[in-house]
Image (cartoon, helix red, strand yellow):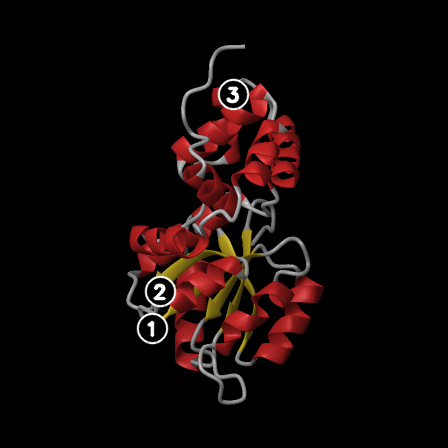
Amino acid sequence: MSTKNVIRVMLVSDHKTWLWGLEQLLAGAQPAMQVVASSTEIDSALLLARTLCPDVIVLDADLGCSGASACAIDYLPQLLGNGVSRALLFSGTQDQAACGRAVRSGARAVVGKETPVKQMVDAIARLYQGELCLDPALLDSMLGVLNKPEAAPDPEEQRIARLTLKERKIVAMMVEGNGALNRAIAQRAFISEQTLRNHLTSIYSKLDVTNRLELYVYATRNRLAEPMPAE
């Protein structure tokens, strides 16, 4: 299999039968995917993530780590430390708090273990393209957790005031797009994807957020998605 345009996937779970089955399914998936590694324990997974830098890491939230429940989530920042990988978490429970903690730790897709294979493959592809793949109920839960009351309005107003008119419009587009690809947002804003990334870097810094999910929460809380006047 040519590695050009192939989504490189690493699987992390202590269910060997599941690992084997998913590997076989991904081998015939479209868009093309290749399982470059699989691991049944977290230490080897951390090493493989550093050395192989897979595009997508599929992590079992119930992976046993020294007997601690769902502690695999605690290792997400380290697994994503290579700066390349994106994480899809799959879980056998509907624990919204644990799933929310996973998202705050870096996961950008969360699916249940009962998710049909086609949807799992679709989630991996969408995640690779930069989309958020979250259940609406989980997104609502995250809004509730992250939407903390403001201690004082002035600091927030000062942050928002630092945004340029163009940046305000981009924030509104990001919220309205609700997980749309950077390419789609860039086309709507009539700018290149690289220019959009530059704007997002500036926006994150000014608003003191670190990713698109936190930007969505911040913008929703502060009503930054309201229409802006023309330049």
Q: Position of residue 228 (x, y in %)?
A: 46, 18
Query: Earlier along the polypeptide chain: callout 3 or callout 2?
Result: 2
Is there CB contact under 8 Å for labels 3 and 1? no
**Residue located beneath label 3 in the image:** 189
Q: Quadrant of residue 79?
A: bottom right
> Which residue reaches farthest right?
51
> Which residue reaches farthest bottom?
67
Mark in the foreground, 3 or 2: 2
Q: Amino acid under label 3?
A: Ala
Q: Amino acid under label 1?
A: Gly
Q: Quadrant of residue 197?
A: top right
**Residue located beneath label 2 in the image:** 96
Mark 2, secondary structure of its residue: helix
**Residue located beneath label 1 in the image:** 92
Q: Residues within 10 Å of mark 3 (few under 14, many from 20)?
A: some
Q: Position of residue 105 (x, y in %)?
A: 54, 61
Residue 170 vertical position relative to residue 88 in the rendered view, above or below: above
